[in-house]
Amino acid sequence: MATAATSRRLPASERLRRSLGNGRVSAILILLPPALILFTLFVILPLGESGYYSFFNWNGYGAPSDFVGLENYERIAGHSIFHKAVGNTVKIVAVSLLIQMPLALALALLIFRKTPTNAVFRLIFFVPYILAEVAAGLIWSFVFDGNYGITASVAQSLGMDSLFILADRDWAFVAVMTVIVWKYFGFHMMIYIAALQSVPEDLIESGRIEGAKRLQIVRYVQIPHIKPAIIVSAFFAIIGALQVFDVIIPLTNGGPSNQTHTIVTYLYTFGLTRLNIGFGSAVGVILFVAAITVAVFYQRFFMKGDKA
């Protein structure tokens, strides 16, 4: 404490000399500029250009010249399919938090201990996350196929008519959410497993000696110790839900009747594929603002206790 107080009283030139001496400033001068250049080229400039293009009616060819002001944003606000896409994105967030994460935590509690059998189960549950999103979507599109897929085979074996789940307005998005849970729960499970393995074993043994049941140990010992991991996992789940795209395109491509669009697939369908780049840029700006708002809010209210 006295050393820190003494260093604060030193002149600025002396503090700079000491920083140069221990290499901190040199490291900053060497490592910071490349990172800033890359961040500017691949994040700041594209965001700025998207914001600029969103004020034009532009098809992506040549320089934008048809200035329309806020017309693109007005069209988005009045588009019922965009409202559906926002609602679907919120549903994915809810399913991720209320179904995917509890499932991942339950499995993590069952197989977190380091044994050969548990290692096999971890691999099995983690494989869906390793698969590319497009590959996972194509696999499940075959599963749900009403003519040749597994769903058709099961329906025929039960003497039922063929089920075309992905063509059903009521069930298509349920199928999409099922695939999303299957695809990503393994990622959250591994986060929880890593956190559970860091819980001191003597605390668990103490709870057992005191007569605590299995569920009591989970509730009062293990879960409180892995709370930071749960908070980070929830953040990944929310941000990931806002970005869902690759799974939906091979499954439904936003159909049937635009019932399974998320914000990102809506941007792709009504912006890029229709060469309405100005409109798509406006959707991208809205998505960026939503993601930043969620990140700032989450950091402010849920992660403030982890700064230490």
Image: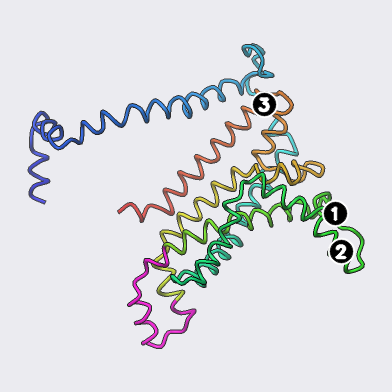
Residue appearing at x 74%, y 55% in the figure = 175
Q: What amino acid type is highlighted by mark number 3? A: Phe
Q: Nearer the viewer, mark 1 or mark 3?
A: 1
Label 2 belongs to which residue?
155
Do callouts 2 and 1 mark residues in contact (Cβ within 8 Å)? no
> Gap between marks 2 and 3, in whole Å?
43 Å
Q: Residues within 10 Å of mark 3 (few under 14, many from 20)?
A: many
Q: What amino acid type is highlighted by mark number 2? A: Ala
Q: Nearer the viewer, mark 2 or mark 1?
A: 1
Residue appearing at x 42%, y 71% in the figure = 222
Work out whether mark 2 precedes mark 1 in sequence or the reverse, and give the earlier one. 1
Q: Nearer the viewer, mark 2 or mark 3?
A: 2
Question: Above or below — where is 165 with respect to 69?
Answer: below
- Residue 148 image label: 1
Q: What amino acid type is highlighted by mark number 1? A: Tyr
Label 3 belongs to which residue?
279
Q: Which residues are magenta?
A: 195-217
Q: Residues within 10 Å of mark 1 (few under 14, many from 20)?
A: few
- Residue 128 image label: none
Question: Above or below — where is 107 with respect to 284?
Answer: below
Question: Above or below — where is 119 with respect to 42?
Answer: below
Q: Quadrant of residue 78?
A: top right
Element under label 1? loop
